[in-house]
Amino acid sequence: MIDSMSSPAPPVVAILLAGGQGTRAGFGQPKQLELLGGKPVLGWSLDALAAHPAISNGVLVANDDVVAAAGPLPDGWISTAPGAERQQSVANALAALADWQDATLALVHDAARPGMTAGVIDRLLAALQTAEAAIPTLPVPDTLVEQAHDEAGDVVDRSVLARVQTPQGFRLGTLRRAHAEAVEATATDDAQLVRRLGTTVAAVPGDARLHKLTYAEDMDILSGLLGTNVMMRTAVGMGYDVHRLVTDKPLWIGGTEIAHSHGLEGHSDADVALHALTDAILGALADGDIGDHFPPSDPQWRGAASHRFLAFAGERVAARGGRIDHLDLTIIAEAPKIGPHRDAIRARISEILAIPVERISVKATTTERLGFTGRREGIAAQAAATLKLPEN
């Protein structure tokens, strides 16, 4: 137990974790930079923590590009690099706080929970007057069952369960010891590591507004919870491209090099699939076409890898506060066969745009030996892109 009457209130520091890429969310950028109510998701937590009168300093754990996008840090804040896993990111933050005394109070928060409230912080700090660690929790309102595959099993007693949120509060010395003694152990949050020390973790009421951003659909939930609802509209664009087959050139289709007797001729690497997708996305944005942004008259694009064009289109969507809901690509060629490469192409497009592979359709067809594709003179591709964009 901590004797709260024996000394002045200890200082409070915040650790804000923003190192993840958030690929499950399917945005064209790290989810912590996605706009929510006109402000990056990261900004909501950063502003709330910096504004609380009890918090004197903080550590933002994020990659350099995220730190740069966040803008100038609040007074008293520093940044440090993230680790490969959440646990290492917290350890990196603790190293950055090496000069702080063990009695300091530390709040560890995930930037993917933008609905920070002063009330939750106050409840955690109050609990830490007598506890070594405290977490916000919410009751489980739904009926819970065990499930094996697609079969529902026995009901689980939800009265003894709770949903755990962040920020989580700790005496800094306790948090340091928990991480030092974790060794090879892993945990999804810091409170689990503290409990392994045999230390009691207090629970305080959480807040429904601390909903976690995991999937793109969570943005709609957060907009409602935080009162930032933005009307979204569906936009569809189409793209088409064709290139001549020539000898002595590599064949790139869908960001994947395919072994073949011929390659495609063009100013760039002539990847018809990625060109069609790029035009489809730009079309949905009403933002011109690939030639407007990457003119073939410009020598800097000679031989350029087409994934740069597609990534650019994805960034344009993110800059508008939109998201890519679905892509449908059809490759038209007599040869080579696309089927054996379909999964690799889908995976590559998913990687370039940072969207789930389930949102990407890749098909192939022939023209029954008719026309230039039927004569194996060239390969064509057509694509459709479906976006969600905020209303102006």
Image (cartoon, rainbow, N blue to C red):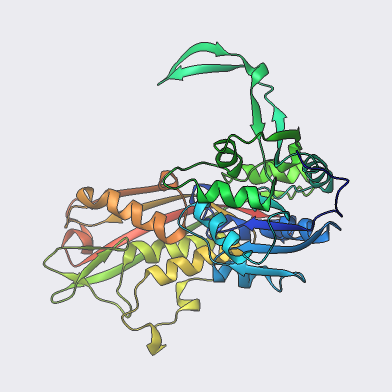
Residue, far left: 261
Q: Nearer the viewer, residue 390 or 43?
A: 43
Residue 287 visible to the viewer: no
Q: Residue at x 42, y 71 (%)?
A: 308
Residue, far front: 6
For residue 55, side relative to residue 313 (left or right): right
For residue 91, side relative to residue 57 (left or right): left
Residue 158 visible to the viewer: yes
Q: Measured from the top left, where is residue 224 in percent x and y?
A: 75, 42
Q: Nearer the viewer, residue 169 or 271?
A: 169
Instruction: In the rendered view, tell whether residue 341 sits above or below residue 50.
Output: above
Q: Measured from the top left, where is residue 33 in percent x and y?
A: 62, 61
Looking at the rendered image, the quarter that the N terminus falls into is: top right
Q: Measured from the top left, where is residue 91 in percent x and y?
A: 54, 57
Residue 59 falls in image quadrant: bottom right
For residue 109, side relative to residue 349 (left or right): right
Residue 261 falls in image quadrant: bottom left
Q: Nearer the viewer, residue 171 or 203?
A: 171
Instruction: In the rendered view, tell whether residue 68 sits above or below residue 368.
Output: below
Looking at the rendered image, the quarter that the C terminus falls into is: bottom right
For residue 227, side relative to residue 370 (left or right): right
Q: Residue at x 61, y 14 (%)?
A: 157
Q: Residue at x 73, y 46 (%)?
A: 223
Q: Residue at x 32, y 63 (%)?
A: 255
The number of discs equals 0
Q: Measured from the top left, where is residue 276 in percent x and y?
A: 40, 63
